[in-house]
């Protein structure tokens, strides 16, 4: 009796294009400073408007996105609930410190963590009393190779783990951050906005940074960094790291 042919090696399951597009919509909205129209979303996603509309309806049903009276789309309240479950202990310990820094310096203060080759904002606090502050929404992301938080995070990684396209100037900027204990940036992520960040190295956690955003201030970068470093120490001690 002939032997049955050996079963072929199992092929990896194909990724879901619909799921991938839905996630991409959430990323697009998370990167924005305000709501987008369906036409803008479909253009950035590279699909027909009708496809973007169907995806948005599903996300809307799950309260992951919301639409206002003009039909503009923004992230919904369910996203905040989901985000609260990510690194819950870290967020819980960081939030009081971020709040104290934001209100003490009059600047938006946020916690960023490494996500692949990007920095993603985990939690952010805007100052309670400020004439003008720069918003930094949770979920906002940018390449780890730009911005003060990215430099602070790169100080915690061996260079072999850096993205392959790092310019020589960034190597020097990260080396300077290691020497000074903090990083700065101006116009790198948001036009006209400056940032100061300090590393937040935690055992068992992804490399992170605490940072502030401002347009103009009388305080020096070193003074701002010293305040951030005190908060970083408090958070590390609270987490036993």
Image: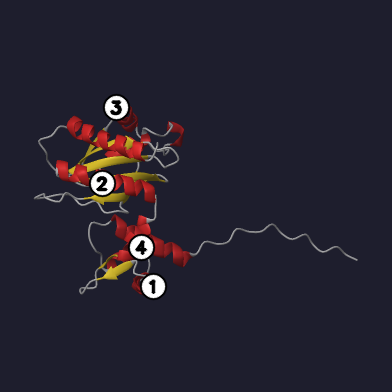
Q: Is residue 116 above or below residue 47?
A: above
User: Residue 133, percent across and down?
Assistant: 15, 49
Q: Please tell me the numbered disc located at residue 176.
A: 3
Q: Residue at x 22, y 47 (%)?
A: 99
Q: Mark 3 or mark 4: name the one nearer the start of the chain.
A: 4
Instruction: Tell me the CA gap for discs 1 and 2.
Output: 35 Å
Question: Residue most toward the right?
Answer: 1
- The reply to whether discs 1 and 4 touch (Cβ–Cβ < 8 Å) is no
Q: Is residue 221 above or below residue 215?
A: above
SS at circle 4 = helix
Q: Please tell me the numbered disc located at residue 122.
A: none
Instruction: Tell me the CA gap for discs 2 and 3.
Output: 29 Å
Nearest to the eye among marks 2 and 3: give it.
2
Q: Is residue 119 above or below residue 19?
A: above
Q: Mark 1 or mark 2: name the one nearer the start of the chain.
A: 1
Q: Which residue is mark 1?
A: 58
Instruction: Tell me the CA gap for discs 3 and 4.
Output: 37 Å
User: Residue 216, percent across and down?
Assistant: 12, 41
Mark 1 surroundings: few (<14), some (14-19) or many (≥20) residues within 10 A? few
- The reply to whether discs 2 and 4 touch (Cβ–Cβ < 8 Å) is no
Horizontal placement of 122 versus 34: left or right? right
User: Residue 197, percent across and down?
Assistant: 26, 37
User: Residue 5, percent across and down?
Assistant: 79, 62
**The image quarter in which residue 240 lies:** top left
Q: Which residue is mark 4?
A: 25
Nearest to the eye among marks 2 and 4: give it.
2
- Tally the marks: 4
Quadrant for the C terminus, please.
Answer: top left
Q: Is residue 103 visible?
A: yes
Mark 2 surroundings: few (<14), some (14-19) or many (≥20) residues within 10 A? some
């Amino acid at each position: 009796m002939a032997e049955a042919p050996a079963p072929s090696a199992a092929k990896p399951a194909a990724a879901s294009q619909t799921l991938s597009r839905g996630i991409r919509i959430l990323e697009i909205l998370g990167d924005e400073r305000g709501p987008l129209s369906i036409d803008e979303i479909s253009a950035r996603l590279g699909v027909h408007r009708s496809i973007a509309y169907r995806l948005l309806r599903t996300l809307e049903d799950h309260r992951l996105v919301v639409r206002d009276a003009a039909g503009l789309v923004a992230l919904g309240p369910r996203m905040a609930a989901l985000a609260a479950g990510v690194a819950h202990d870290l967020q819980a310990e960081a939030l009081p410190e971020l709040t104290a820094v934001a209100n003490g310096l009059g600047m938006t203060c946020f916690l960023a963590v490494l996500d692949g080759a990007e920095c993603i904002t985990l939690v952010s606090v805007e100052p309670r009393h400020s004439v003008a502050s720069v918003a930094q929404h949770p979920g906002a992301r940018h390449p780890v190779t730009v911005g003060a938080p990215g430099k602070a995070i790169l100080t915690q990684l061996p260079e072999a783990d850096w993205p392959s396209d790092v310019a020589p100037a960034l190597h020097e900027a990260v080396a300077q951050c290691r020497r000074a204990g903090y990083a700065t940036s101006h116009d790198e992520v948001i036009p006209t906005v400056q940032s100061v960040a300090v590393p937040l190295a935690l055992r068992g956690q992804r490399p992170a940074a605490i940072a502030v955003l401002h347009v103009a201030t009388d305080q020096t970068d070193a003074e701002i960094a010293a305040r951030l470093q005190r908060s970083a120490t408090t958070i590390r001690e609270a987490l036993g790291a």
